[in-house]
Amino acid sequence: TDWMDGISPPSSPGVRMLKTELVAPKSLAAAVAGSAAIGAAGNLTVATPQVSANGPVDLTLAATGDLVLASTGAAVAGQTPPAAGASLEFIGANVTVDTHVRSPSGQVNVTATNGNVTLGSSALIDVSGFSQTFLTKTVSADGGAVSLIANLGGIDIRNGATIDVSAGTGQGSGGSVALRAPSGGVTIAGTMNGKGGKSGHGASLLVDTETFLGAAHAM
């Protein structure tokens, strides 16, 4: 587990952040079962090439100010593959995701409580499905769910950003994407992948907003 300075592996549902900047050079991976929360009063920046989970965990990163997930530019090769089915939640006044977030067949929820949700050009939110073989039988898991919510602002998915809720390497269905900005606008200039497998269907997309500008690559 790559818990860094100022963070303890949680033995209870809450973990307090002692610093407002967290640097995880390899990856930030939660390896506990149950629920874990990392919070900061004020702004919080997390610099890491990947955020994921190594077990069945509900992980929340929250800040009362702005939350930024930034890439370090380092490669993720050689890291333990992310565990399937985890729920990753990111909450801040404004939230910027500009690194890789992975949870195979899992959930990723991003909420801006007082401003905007931005996916930068280096952002990848990947909850794609997969297949696994047990003895002689291969089972597929569907793509997961991604939710971006800007309570009082807008959602900006910039060119280069990718949301992947596809069936992935499996033969199941694509998952779902929900974009909610009831008081602002939604701009999509990035890529959305929701392709289903041979035995499934494609993903669903819900957009709830006042204004919509969509130029995304096909889903």
Image (spheres, helix red, strand yellow):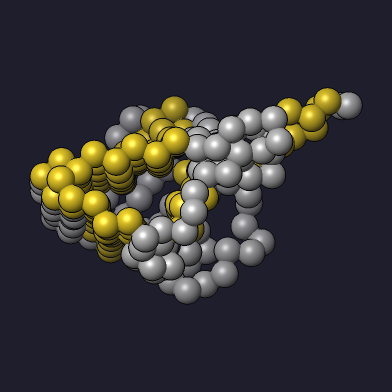
The number of numbered discs placed on residues in the rendered structure image is 0
Give the answer, above or below, for where 175 lies relative to 68. above
Image spot of residue 19 (x, y percent): 25, 59
Horizontal side of 147 relative to 100 (left or right) equals left
Q: Residue at 14% of width from left, 50% of height from top?
A: 184
Q: In the image, is residue 65 above or below residue 130?
A: below
**Residue 173: percent from left, percent from top:** 59, 33
Q: Give the image quarter of residue 34.
A: top left
* Residue name at image x 63 percent, y 49 percent: 81
Which residue is the extreme one toward the bottom? 73
Residue at x 59% of width, y 33% of height: 201
Image-quadrant location for residue 209: top left
Residue 115 locus on image (x, y percent):
13, 53
Is residue 144 shown to the viewer in this render?
no
Answer with left or right where residue 105 lies relative to residue 5. right
Q: Nearer the viewer, residue 193 or 31?
A: 193
At x 83%, y 25%, the residue is: 137
Question: Which quadrant of the figure has residue 104?
Answer: top right
160 is higher (above) or lower (below) than 164? below
- Taking depth in this image into account, of 125 and 198 the one nearest to the observer is 198
Q: Is residue 39 left or right of residue 57?
A: left
Residue found at the far right of this picture: 136
Pick the front one: 62 or 94: 94
Residue 212: image x %, image y %? 24, 51
Query: Can see residue 86?
Result: yes
